[in-house]
Image: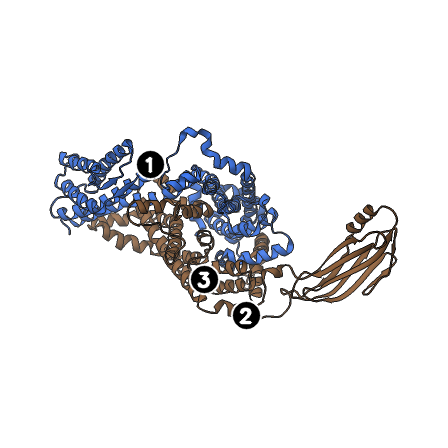
Chain colours: A brown, B blue
């Protein structure tokens, strides 16, 4: 007698569902891996290579063709040079078709002429090397038209230098440069200061603002909208406004401080150590407290009010209700917010870049990526800093996932 | 400490410092004249006022009105809470005096409401302190939010000389008529800001559409289907969310340079949606999970295919969520600065944020920069205020991204 057993393994229906699921996800997966995963691999690759901004244009031969001389001493000239001053270009050849109706004189090495086809083989062109080919010609007829004809026909060039990006040579030079000296530890310290105080400050301010608005009154929606302004406005607008506001010469904040007798002379808020670092941290707090505020307020409004009623019956005072009821209820969202904001403050680039450009002791790791890659034009070193950031982030996200899966059940 | 005659003077003293500073800053910013809070005198005046208010509990007791009026009028002598500069106009002086007296009376009466003179219970004491902090909080947050935006708008209406002469004078000379907006007309006429506005608009709208096109099916799949790797997928969305843009911008810059996509709107439109798809997907899948499956199953039973179910049932049901996500994505794309800054060099192809960066140079007067900032801010603010409900929901739904 056979007993009915439930089917094991994946059935046809489940398989079809999974197939559909992946089909729906495919566009996202493909595009995201193209723009996120691939660049991440690329940056790790580049960080081991001596790659500078100028390597974006690999060395190549460059040629200029012109008609020189006059009368009997007429010649077509090709001036060839290596675009790079240091790196040799290999396998350089030039080929061109000479125009009709021209008598060609003697052809010298390394060129040969077959019919109308000119071919020159230069072999290797050293860094900064220049070559000049003269081809004596005689022309009957209109010289100007001929000149146009000569300059119009583009000679074809071959030859390429070594491509730093694709060869298999690696070095640790970039990392050595990044970790070298006290600069790196300075940058790390600035990053930590900015991240820790920016995150905590925004959380505390957000909690305070949420406490203010956690009651219903007329105009509550308006004030809530108003307090979100710093976050919603484009960073570029608010950052430049802060720079204008705290300008040492025409800034209102300085004028106000001087007028109120708090300072005898204008202060260069974004140009002095350590004030600049404090100012960018304050900006970070100012710009992101609305976000913490919004989340904390949403959580507060979902706390069961009967708990507070029970506490009222027991005669709990307002402070007691805050410390013993609200705070424990908010601890979950506060810690999730802390972790998330910590990571994103760590990643922040725009704000500091716009406020100080990383000067006056405000260079964080992310700003350092830009500084190394574009200000010093050493993309390899920038990539090495980026890899350092990635390693930190992987460490953070381990903590994050361990924690958030407990908190949010993700 | 829990004595009415101790608590009230302390709160009153600190409160008067707050009020005096607020009035002084407000008056300075609106008239440009000199106002200065005198902290020491404020503490003394405030302590006295606090004592009076707690001693005479009636709402509008003559003693209360008297001390507030006295305190306001003392501003005329140089021994008041606010020191008024000698060259201040009469109206400004009157406004300051009246504002000090009225604000002080109303706020102190509110803070010390039902606070007895003698022994305080724990509730009475804490509530007075909480009312004090509530008042302080509203003033503080409103000030820090409003002042930068006020300065931004007002600076854009001033001339460079006026700004250097008195950086505090934001009074607007209405007699110059439309000349007031010359920074704006110059930006639109000489700096192509009309084009930038249009570029930003269509880039943002395209980003919203492409993002939705990609993320709606993806979010649906994550929310509804069981398949291998689902959990890993959800997590990797969050992980991708955490990769800093500058790290990605570097290889993207290299790739775009090599392929010639740099300096093209096409490149920007290709890259923006990818930065927003993970966010949108995360927000939408949260919403889809909350939708009842029964409706969809009914559709399936009636012979609709899965795609038809998504199109005809799920999407119409999730219109509010789609609106939130669209707004949020629009905001990200509109405010985006880093990629536009790195990838666009050609002034004819700038987005608005890139155009404003261009104005940050010592050769271009400050009011142009601020006018540019206003132009970049106003559309997103208008959208935000008009659709605040959606926006707030969108912000809370899945985004702690900044």
Q: Which of the chains bears the disc numbered 3?
A: A
Which label's residue is closer to the chain start, 3 or 2?
2
Instruction: Give the structural element (helix, strand or loop) at label 3.
Output: helix
**Other-residue count near label 2 (Cα within 10 Å), few / some / many at <14 / 14–19 / ≥20:** some
Which residue does the numbered mark 2 point to in the structure image?
A: A173
Q: Report if residue B259 is visible in the image.
A: yes
Residue at left offset 13%, top offset 46%: B5
Residue at left offset 47%, top offset 52%: A350
Q: Position of residue B211 (x, y in %)?
A: 55, 48
Instruction: Give the structural element (helix, strand or loop) at label 2.
Output: helix
Please tell me whether mark 3 or mark 2 is closer to you in this view.
2
Q: Position of residue A83 (x, y in %)?
A: 67, 60
Q: Position of residue B162 (x, y in %)?
A: 40, 38
Q: Which of the chains bears the disc numbered 2?
A: A
**Other-residue count near label 1 (Cα within 10 Å), few / some / many at <14 / 14–19 / ≥20:** some
User: What is the C-alpha distance between the residues marked 3 and 2?
Assistant: 28 Å
Please tell me whether mark 1 or mark 2 is closer to you in this view.
1
Decide: marks 3, 1 in contact (CB < 8 A)? no
The circle on residue B31 is 1
Which residue does the numbered mark 3 point to in the structure image?
A: A397
Q: Position of residue A366 (x, y in %)?
A: 48, 59
Instruction: Give the structural element (helix, strand or loop) at label 1.
Output: helix
């Amino acid at each position: 007698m056979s007993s009915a057993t439930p089917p094991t393994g994946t059935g046809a229906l489940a398989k079809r569902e999974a197939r559909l699921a992946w089909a729906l996800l495919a566009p996202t997966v493909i595009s995201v891996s193209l723009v996120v995963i691939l660049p991440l691999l690329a940056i790790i690759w580049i960080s081991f290579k001596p790659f500078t901004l100028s390597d974006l244009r690999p060395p190549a031969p460059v040629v200029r063709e012109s008609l020189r001389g006059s009368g009997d001493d007429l010649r077509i000239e090709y001036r060839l040079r290596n675009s790079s001053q240091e790196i040799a270009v290999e396998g350089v050849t030039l080929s061109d078709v000479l125009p009709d109706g021209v008598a060609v004189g003697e052809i010298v090495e390394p060129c040969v002429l077959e019919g109308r086809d000119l071919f020159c083989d230069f072999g290797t062109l050293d860094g900064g090397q220049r070559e000049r080919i003269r081809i004596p010609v005689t022309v009957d007829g209109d010289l100007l038209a001929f000149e146009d004809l000569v300059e119009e026909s583009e000679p074809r060039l071959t030859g390429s230098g070594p491509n730093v990006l694709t060869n298999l040579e690696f070095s640790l030079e970039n990392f050595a440069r990044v970790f070298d000296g006290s600069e790196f530890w300075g940058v790390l310290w600035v990053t930590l200061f900015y991240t820790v105080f920016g995150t905590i400050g925004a959380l505390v301010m957000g909690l305070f603002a949420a406490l203010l608005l956690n009651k219903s009154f007329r105009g509550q929606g308006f004030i809530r909208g108003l307090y979100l302004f710093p976050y919603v406005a484009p960073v570029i607008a608010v950052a430049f406004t802060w720079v204008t506001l705290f300008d040492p010469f025409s800034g209102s904040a300085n004028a106000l401080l001087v007028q109120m007798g708090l300072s005898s002379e204008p202060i260069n808020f974004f140009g002095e150590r350590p004030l600049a670092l404090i100012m960018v941290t304050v900006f970070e707090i100012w710009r992101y407290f609305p976000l913490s505020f919004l989340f904390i307020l949403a959580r507060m409004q979902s706390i069961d009010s009967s708990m507070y009623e029970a506490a009222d019956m027991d005669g709990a005072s307002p402070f007691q209700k805050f410390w013993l009821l609200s705070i424990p209820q908010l601890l979950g969202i506060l810690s999730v917010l802390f972790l998330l904001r910590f990571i994103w403050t760590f990643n922040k680039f725009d704000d500091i870049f716009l406020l100080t450009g990383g000067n006056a002791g405000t260079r964080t790791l992310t700003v350092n990526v830009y500084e190394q890659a574009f200000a010093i034009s050493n993309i390899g070193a920038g990539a090495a800093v980026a890899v350092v950031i990635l390693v930190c982030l992987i460490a953070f996200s381990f903590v994050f996932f361990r924690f958030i899966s407990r908190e949010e059940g993700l | 400490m829990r004595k009415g005659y101790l608590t009230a003077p302390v709160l009153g003293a600190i409160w008067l410092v707050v009020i005096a500073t607020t009035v002084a800053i407000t008056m300075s910013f609106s008239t440009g004249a000199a106002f200065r809070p005198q902290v020491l005198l404020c503490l003394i005046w405030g302590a006295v006022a606090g004592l009076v208010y707690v001693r005479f509990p009636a709402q509008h007791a003559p003693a209360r009105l008297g001390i507030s009026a006295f305190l306001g009028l003392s501003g005329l002598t140089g021994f008041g809470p606010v020191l008024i500069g000698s060259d201040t106009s009469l109206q400004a002086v009157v406004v300051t005096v009246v504002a000090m007296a009225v604000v002080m009376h109303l706020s102190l009466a509110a803070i010390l409401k039902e606070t007895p003179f003698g022994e305080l219970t724990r509730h009475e004491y804490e509530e007075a302190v909480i009312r004090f902090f509530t008042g302080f909080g509203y003033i503080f947050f409103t000030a820090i939010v409003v002042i930068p935006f006020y300065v931004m708008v007002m600076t854009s209406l001033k001339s460079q000389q006026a700004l250097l002469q008195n950086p505090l004078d934001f009074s607007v000379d209405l007699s110059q008529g439309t000349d007031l907006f010359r920074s704006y007309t110059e930006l639109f006429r000489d700096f192509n800001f009309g084009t930038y506005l249009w570029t930003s608009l269509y880039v943002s709208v395209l980003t919203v559409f492409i993002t939705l096109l990609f993320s709606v099916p993806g979010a649906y799949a994550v929310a509804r289907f069981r398949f291998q790797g689902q959990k890993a997928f959800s997590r990797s969305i969050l992980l991708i969310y955490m990769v800093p843009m500058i790290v990605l911008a570097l290889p993207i810059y290299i790739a775009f340079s090599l392929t010639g996509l740099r300096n093209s709107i096409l490149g920007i439109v290709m890259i923006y949606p990818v930065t927003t798809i993970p966010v949108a997907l995360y927000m939408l899948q949260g919403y889809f999970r909350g939708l009842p499956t029964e409706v969809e199953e009914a559709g399936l039973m009636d012979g609709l295919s899965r795609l038809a179910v998504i199109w005809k049932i799920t999407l119409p049901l999730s219109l509010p969520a789609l609106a939130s996500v669209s707004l949020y994505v629009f905001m990200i794309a509109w405010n985006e600065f880093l990629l536009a800054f790195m990838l666009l060099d050609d002034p004819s192809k700038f987005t608005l944020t890139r155009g404003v960066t261009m104005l940050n140079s010592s050769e271009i007067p400050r009011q142009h920069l601020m006018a540019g900032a206003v132009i970049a801010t106003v559309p997103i603010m208008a959208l935000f205020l008009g659709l605040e409900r959606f926006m707030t929901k969108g912000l809370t739904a899945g985004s702690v991204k900044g």
